Image: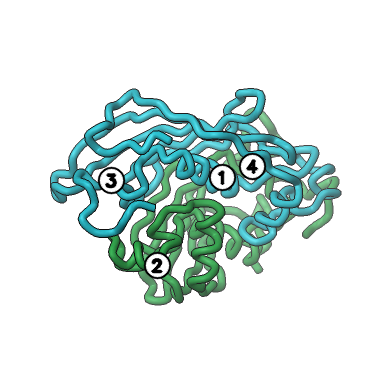
Chain colours: A green, B cyan
Amino acid sequence: MYDWHFDDLTPGMRFESLGKTLSEAEIIDFAFQYDPQPFHIDKAHAEAGPYGGIIASGVQTIGTAIRMMVQARVFAPEIVLGSPGVEELRWVQPVRPGDTIRSTGELLEVRASQSKPERGIVRYRMDVLNQRDEVVMTMTSTTFVRREPAATGGAA
Amino acid sequence: MYDWHFDDLTPGMRFESLGKTLSEAEIIDFAFQYDPQPFHIDKAHAEAGPYGGIIASGVQTIGTAIRMMVQARVFAPEIVLGSPGVEELRWVQPVRPGDTIRSTGELLEVRASQSKPERGIVRYRMDVLNQRDEVVMTMTSTTFVRREPAATGGAA
């Protein structure tokens, strides 16, 4: 639990989540609903294909990494106001059934919004690592956070 | 069904998928597993929060848009070799329960790989629209495709 609030945040602060092992079944289930390409959902096709076997949808890697970051409470849940987007995202190497991934990251920039004084803007880099500490995904993103303790809405 | 192969591809070609209506239940279910932030999963908190109600995880918007693009068979399934990443992704406005989203897009760049002659590289822009034709998400991404009919691995 980090539970960082805006006044705690400084560029260079680092975080790391717990890990999650992805089963073949959940990789196929997720991709069947959200990214139904043959190398994610069809074992025989995947084995004959470019990756030599089933690999996880990159969208599932994003979601798993974000959940692990949310569960680590990197930012206190009551300050997070959503994200305008992602600057760059790279799928560096495949995530395969049985792999365990975790989120690590570093704050790059912390500033107050010019237009909305109650809002802070945090740029961060996330590196998703596997059980061999190899980078499988990198992402640079921005999150909006409240600068004051929330007046409405309790903590999660 | 577009079922484009490499030799068909030219910058400026456009595609559009069918639409998908997102229910409140599936928005909450997805986010509970992959992006469990209060404004995605807790109605009372979301109503008092920055968006005035539950909004879909941006990760679910990505996945839904990709599935709709895969189902439209923009690229023939047997030529797709995966993606190295995303250049830029913006969540322009919230997706709310009951909204219907669809993928539209345009090919930006089509070229042969220098290092792997059997591979083509396609840059494209995707705009995800809602039922009012408002842009909810934009993404610029790259996909690798086979340049020849697949020797192994059948069509999906």
Give how far across and how far down residue B148 sits, in percent: 19, 45
Q: Label 2 sits on what residue type? A: Lys
Q: Chain of mark 2?
A: A
Q: Label 1 sits on what residue type? A: Thr
**Residue found at x 69% / y 34%:** A117
In the picture, the quarter occupied by the C terminus of chain A is: bottom right
Q: Within 10 angstroms of label 1, few (less than 14), some, or many (20 or more) residues?
A: many
* SS category of the residue bearing label 1: helix
| Label 3 close to label 4 by CB (< 8 Å) | no
* CA gap, disc 3 and disc 1: 21 Å
Give how far across and how far down residue B48 sits, in percent: 84, 43
Badges 3 and 1, same chain: yes
Residue to which mark 3 is pinned: B145
Give how far across and how far down residue A154 sits, in percent: 83, 54
* CA gap, disc 3 and disc 4: 41 Å
Give the side of residue B82 with respect to residue B61, left or right: left
Give the side of residue A24 with respect to residue A78, left or right: left
Quarter of the view holding residue B112: top left
| Label 2 close to label 3 by CB (< 8 Å) | no
Of labels 3 and 4, the one closer to you: 3
Residue to which mark 1 is pinned: B64
Give how far across and how far down residue B44 sits, in percent: 86, 49
Residue to which mark 4 is pinned: A120
User: Residue A43, which numbered label?
Assistant: 2
Q: How many marks?
A: 4
**Residue found at x 40% / y 28%:** B106
Badges 3 and 4, same chain: no
Q: Within 10 angstroms of label 2, few (less than 14), some, or many (20 or more) residues?
A: some
* CA gap, disc 2 and disc 4: 46 Å
